[in-house]
Amino acid sequence: MKLSTLDKFNNIVIQMHDNPDADAVGSGFALYKYFKEKEKNVRLVYGGPMKIRKSNMLLMIEKLDIPVEYVDKLDKPELLITVDCQYGEGNVQRFEAENIAIIDHHNTGRESGEMEEIRSHIVSCATVCFDMLKDEGFDVNSDKNVATALYYGMFMDSNEMSELRHPLERDMLDCLKYDKKLIKKLIHNNFSIQEMETAGIALIRFNYDENKRLSIIHSKPCDPNILGVIGDMVLKVDSIDVSIIYNERPDGYKLSLRSCIPEIGVNDMVAFLTEDIGNGGGHYDKAGGFVSKKKFVEKYGEMSIETYFFNRVDEYYNQFEIIYSKDGIEDKSEFKLYEKLPYRYGFVKSEDITNGDEEVRLRTFEGDISITGSPDTYLMIGWFGGAYPISREDFERKYEVTGNTYEETFEYSPSVFSYKENRSKSIMPFARECIALPGSRVYARRIEKHTKVFGKWDYEKYMYGEIGDYLCISETDEHDIYIVKGDIFEKTYN
Ligand SMILES: [Mn+2]
């Protein structure tokens, strides 16, 4: 949904979930300002059993001048927009309205409809709003309070930015001109004495698996950020490599994961733990997620959440295989030779975007990779806009340059962050077209077991392959081992 499709309404109420958090308030406030600018009659409200009490929230609302109203009834507005929540869910007081729109980032199983924008792969609703506002040409930095509110919303929903997932979130971080002093003040007003006690109790009541060097903690209800604080502390213990902490909320369970070993990337692990019943993601070493109670019961019925986490963690550990590119693969008996079909791809010469040997961060779905501009390094643009580095030598062996420019639109346009210019910029304007040469071949086999590959380019991180993806070895370089998504492989190889 484009935000401007709602411009036709005049009486608009933006509703946050009950007991709104920073993400709900930040998102709601930014939308409020958008509609105010369009001279709409707009209100920002929440209902539910209790008024906001948390000190950071009260401070945020006061200092940023956010016109939040606590209401117990509405007189059927022309348009009701629920933000950071979905109309009809248990954590949103139900009000009648002539039209209903939803802007959210929770995975409740509902798909975006005509007047709905639900992006469950995004860490915060503030990020969804940021993107929608940007699309409308609304400058979020024109009002420092709006920029600060959006920043704080994402900050709180991502465990202080440590659980960011999507390149868009990193763009938002780079773009916002927010009030640093106020953010600092909010950080230091976040926990109450009771919550400190909760953290203490959580640390005493831990579950520990000696073989996996893993701890699972069920904390009492508390601010989600406390989970991150506890997790960071738990990981400093000499006999623990992986920490899972979760707690219960009215609508589900909030999870926070930490890892300090390269073989376990908690971004994959949380995605596995929340598969079909919620959403999750983040980084290799820090990640977060959410399990919806409704979806959990639908899928697992009476099972307790403790049992579920223990079983599921076992499954995760039992089912993956690890491959180190530097060691190569000895047994190639199940691999078959495939030929790359002559598809069109985009590529960029790294020098074109870096002005010489400048260092930039290439922003990919898997995270940022540092690239130094060089005549010998190119960037390939794959399906869905995923970009990755390739040496010129490999490139010239596998592709032929057509001389055309390469124009495609993607959900997220591949981009680099330039340290020199202190901004991120799309690489698409520099993209040229090439065609895969016939004879570019790989050995590949279908993955039957979750596989982690420590690749050639960045040894600290692995690529994660799920069942149905393909494990590939370059025909000419046995240390060039990588994973290609199943659907992409089947389309582009023969
Ligand atoms: Mn949120």
Image: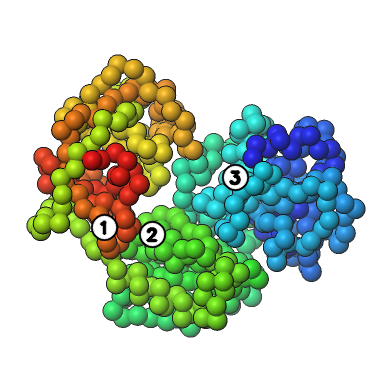
Residue on which the image places disc 1: 447
Of mark 1 and mark 2, the one earlier in the sequence is 2
C-alpha separation, residue under disc 1 versus residue under disc 3: 34 Å
Q: Residue at the right extreme? A: 75
Q: Which residue is mark 3?
A: 128
Looking at marks 1 and 3 on the same chain, the residue that comes earlier in the sequence is marked by 3
Q: Nearer the viewer, residue 257 or 41?
A: 41
Name the residue at 40% across, 73% down. Answer: 312
Which residue appears at 71% of the width and 42% of the height? 31
**The disc labelled 3 sits on which kind of residue?**
Val
Dot 2 corresponds to which residue?
A: 268
Q: What element does badge 1 sit on?
A: loop
- Does any atom of ligand 1 lie closer than 8 Å to the CB of label 2? no
Between marks 2 and 3, how big is the CA–CA gap? 22 Å
Instruction: Identify the residue at image location x=38%, y=59%.
Output: 268
Q: Nearer the viewer, residue 135 or 25?
A: 135
The reply to whether discs 1 and 3 touch (Cβ–Cβ < 8 Å) is no
